Every structure is written in structure tokens, then in C-alpha cells.
Amino acid sequence: MLKILTVCGAGVGSSMMLKVYTQQIIKNEKLDAKVDATDIGSIDPNSADIIVTTSDFADVLRNTNAQVVKIDNLTDKEYLKTELLAAVEKINN
Amino acid sequence: MIKDLFSKNTIATNLNVDTWQDAVKAAGSLMLEEGLIEEQYIDSMINKVKELGPYIVIAPGIAMPHSRPEDGVNKTGMSLITLEKGINFGHEKNDPVTLVIALAAKDNKSHISSLAELMDVLGNQELLNKILSSDSSEEIYELLNKN
């Protein structure tokens, strides 16, 4: 099972929203994955296969082994879906 | 439900501010007046941006300042302000900001489904344009609850 982390600054806003959207995508695409939300202060970057976050934090996370999905527009679900599926594909190959 | 998060009192339109700090303060004051937060929460929202960067600009033109539950939240809720002129928060792609939606969350769960509904409204370009061009908090309240 893939482990996905959604990350933001405080852990109550963007990361939770990204978690909701990611869960919807997992369900619709029937992916074998689990998603948790966390904040940038308490994340263990190597504990996930995929990290979904905003661009600001993607720079902080550049040393991780995980696939990092960068989101600039939280209202653009279609973009998240495309990027997430591409990351899953990379891991599976 | 989105109406669990907003009241007509926490919506204001066409505010004239000069800095992103003042925009956050204006949105924060509405939550303060409603008793959703303690005063310290406003500074805390500003400090989060200083500390972590302008990631709160979550979509083109839209900022969602917030801090953590323990930073002075009394009750979960949001405020919404539209700005007369666009303000730069220092975001690479999403500046300038004309819509500020401040969030006070009592925990990291109860508000999430309402927040997801709100994102659907903001992702609807037609509804968003109506919200941005409205000068009535009453009308914005109706638009938010239309979905």
C-alpha cells in the first residue's frame, strides 16, 4: 500500500483540504493507498512514498526520497489528480 | 455545510488596505468581533506567514490565513473579505490577492467537509467572479451557500 502525506504549515488548512481531495482521487481511481495530513514542523519526509504540498514547502522537502507533488492552486482538483497519478506511475515502474 | 463556518457578520466587501498584514488583520477583526478567536490569533496568523512563507495564498488571488487551534481559537469559523485593490503576499504565482478568507479551526477535523465545499465554490469561476464583484455581504453569504 502506498503511503501519501499531505503537508502544510499549520496542519489544519491546506493539508487537510489536500487530504480530502487525495482521498477522493484514491477512491475514484481505486488506488491502494493511505493518506495522512501533517504540518511541516512534524513531518518525517522519508516516511511517505508520495508527499503532496504547496510549492513553498516542496523546496524544504527536496532531500526526501518520496515523490513530491507540488500544488499552487488548491481549487484545481484536476491538476492534483493528474500529478498524483503520474507520481503513482513513477513508483510502480 | 458552508453556513456552519460563516455568518453575515464575518463577511465584508471592498476593504481598502495597503499591506498583506493589514488584510490579515481586517479578516481577523471580523472573527474577533464574533468571538471566534482571541486577539493573539491575529498576530499568530501574520507570524505564520513570516515564518513559513506565503503558502496561504492557496489559489490565484485567494489567501487563506490561519494558525493553529492552540493559538487562540474559541470556536471554529471563517471570515471573508474582498479587497478594493489587489495586495501582494509575496507568492510566486498567485499574487495579487483580492479575496481573503481567514480560518479559525478548533481542531483539525470538524471543519474539513465544509472547507472542501468552500473550495468547490471558489473553484467555480462563475461563482467566484460574482463574489469578487459583489458589494453586499448578504449577497456573498447567499452565493456561498448556493452549491
Image (cartoon, coloured by chain):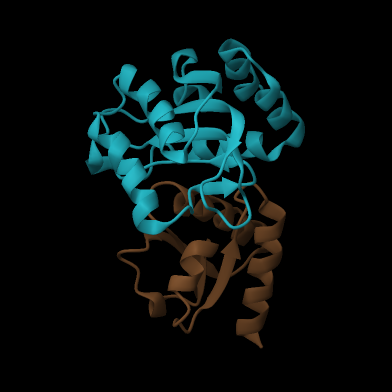
Q: Position of residue B52 (x, y in %)?
A: 39, 58
* Residue B36 as seen in the image, left or right of residue A67: left
Chain rendered cyan = B
Q: In this orientation, which residue lies closer to the viewer: B67 or B43?
A: B43
Q: Residue at x 46, y 33 (%)?
A: B23
Q: In this orientation, which residue lies closer to the viewer: B93 or A73?
A: B93
Can you say whether B136 is above or below A14 in the image?
A: above
Can you say whether A2 is above or below B100 in the image?
A: below
Q: In this orientation, which residue lies closer to the viewer: A45 or A22?
A: A45
Q: In this orientation, which residue lies closer to the viewer: B131 or B1?
A: B131
Which quadrant would residue B14 be assigned to in this image?
top right
Q: Residue at x 52, y 34 (%)?
A: B100
Q: Is residue B1 visible?
A: no
Q: Residue at x 57, y 26 (%)?
A: B82
Which quadrant would residue A36 be assigned to in this image?
bottom left
Colour applied to chain A = brown
From this viewpoint, which residue is outermost toward the right? B126
